[in-house]
Amino acid sequence: MEEKKEDMLPQDNEVASIGIEEIANRMEELLNANEVPSREDADRLSAYYYRLTPSAGGQEGSEDEAAVLRYMQILTRYKEVRAVQQERIREEIRRHTEEKGKLLDRMQELLSSTEDMSVIKQQFNSIREQWDALGEVDPTVKSEYLSRYSKLMEEFYELKNLTNEFRDLDFQKNKEIKEQLIAAAVKLSESEDPISAFNALQLLHDRWKETGPVAPDLREPMWKEFKDATVIVNKNHSSFFEKRRENEKKNLEKKTALCEKAEAILNPLPSTGEQWKAAAALIEALREEWRTIGPVPKKNNTEIYKRFREATNSFFAQRRTSAKMFREKIDKHLEKYAQLLEKAEALKDSTDWVPTSQKLMDLQKEWKELGGLGVKSAEANKLWHAFQAACNHFFDRKQADLKDRNTKREANLKQKREIASKMESLSASELSPEELAERIAELQEEWSKVGLVPAKHKDEINDAFYSALRAAQAKAHKGEPGKGRHSGPRYSTPIEEMNNDTISGEIRSLNTLLEKMEHELKQYENNLSFFSASGSGKDALLAPVIKKMDNLKREIERLTERRKALQKALKG
């Protein structure tokens, strides 16, 4: 089905969502198609249009001004086209009024005519057809014409010479028409559009008056039916306008509150770029909210609109003044940004992770404290992206290094667990003491070559390995004084055959072993001082302990020398 041109106009419930350009486009499209909207529709759209553009004084004011200018041009064209249309309509109404007046005079003449009744009926039907074909008449005589027409119709049907057959036939025809009018009125009483229903009802009343009478016994009941539906339509119409007046009153209260909020933003004025930005966002939010609020009472419309527009215009005017002053300070900010960027660039390739991280975080904090640059935000953004890239470059490298170290340490942990497990299994092996000592030395050698493990597993894996080591050594040297827990690996691999990783691993192993041996020696010394304070017979008890201490001291001395040699090789 082809879309009606009047349907192209936005309805009240869609105006807020389609935007100001679409309103202008639809109005212009109608005019291009020689379709002229009603004055009510034009006024309604104009009200919505200006409601959607409450201020042309903001930073974005040029767009609003262009939109308003375009709509004003379209509205001017509309007024010109409508003026031509209205003149044509007035001319048609004058013609219809004149011709219907003549038809009424002819009807009056027919009632006193002495011609044959068949001729009178023929002329009378012709008058009715002509009447129905003509349009509206002058509103000042419309009621008079309809009343006169209805009365003449009734008088015609009362003519004594009118045959009963003709009268009954016309009564039936009129009855069918009025039944249709009653049904239409009832349907209008159920309509959800009270304005359209009210306007349509007036046409039904005109048609009722233009329709001839029905049988006398049906006239009152049918009129009552029609009138009852009319009462409902009129009541709905009155309720609608009463509700609209109430809504307009509430809308005025809402718009007054928006004016007060807009005026409050001006006192005191923002003092920083960020505050101006936040205040502008608030003003824009108020403007958006203004656009969603419906019309106010006509008597208040101009005043409330002017108040809100003045508040928003004043805000943006003072914002421009502030921005002009702010631009004078921008170059210093840009210079400071460039200095921070230069420092970040100098640090981004550092491997000194902890202190460099702190330095870069301090630079980031300093950057943040400087704030934004408003109108030169493009230059600031360029520097910011470069600064951010330098920081990200460093922290990405730091994260990758940490991830790599964690991966290696997890692998080392797995390897050390395997070595500890092998060492633990030696306690139950069937190897000879010599073979067992050889195997212990090999596993210690392997252990010393493995790197660091995750800190949270360090104590756990060391305890597991050295517990197994002591157990294996005890089995290998069972009953042999001076040997056992710390006989240790031979550490006899020529240093010149070892790489840096192997040397580092052996140093770490020696550090752990020497720490435990020194702790054990200290325990022996404490025990020895206890026995020294005892009575006779102590020499027999102390002899094995002293021998173990001597062996332990020699082993500590040997391993300490080995460690020094390894450290020297690593530095060299």
Image: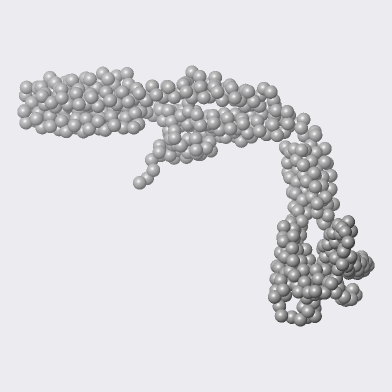
**In the foreground, 527 or 239:** 527
Kindly identify the residue that appears in the image at 72 percent across and 37 percent down: 374
- In-image side of 302 versus 431 (left or right): left
Quarter holding the C terminus is bottom right
Percent coordinates x, y for residue 331 in the rendering? 81, 38
Kindly identify the residue that appears in the image at 41 percent across and 28 percent down: 86
Q: Is residue 286 above or below residue 556?
A: above
Percent coordinates x, y for residue 439 in the rendering? 77, 77
**In the foreground, 27 or 237:** 237
Percent coordinates x, y for residue 338 in the rendering? 82, 45
Please give the count of numbered marks on the rendered protein: 0
Kindly identify the residue that appears in the image at 76 percent across and 38 percent down: 369
**In the foreground, 488 or 114:** 488
Q: Quadrant of residue 261?
A: top right
Kindly identify the residue that appears in the image at 31 percent across and 23 percent down: 235
Q: Is residue 199 above or below residue 484?
A: above
- In-image side of 551 versus 86 (left or right): right
Q: Quadrant of residue 411?
A: bottom right
Percent coordinates x, y for residue 416 in the rendering? 73, 68
- Is residue 267 something that shows in the picture? yes
**In the foreground, 232 or 170:** 232
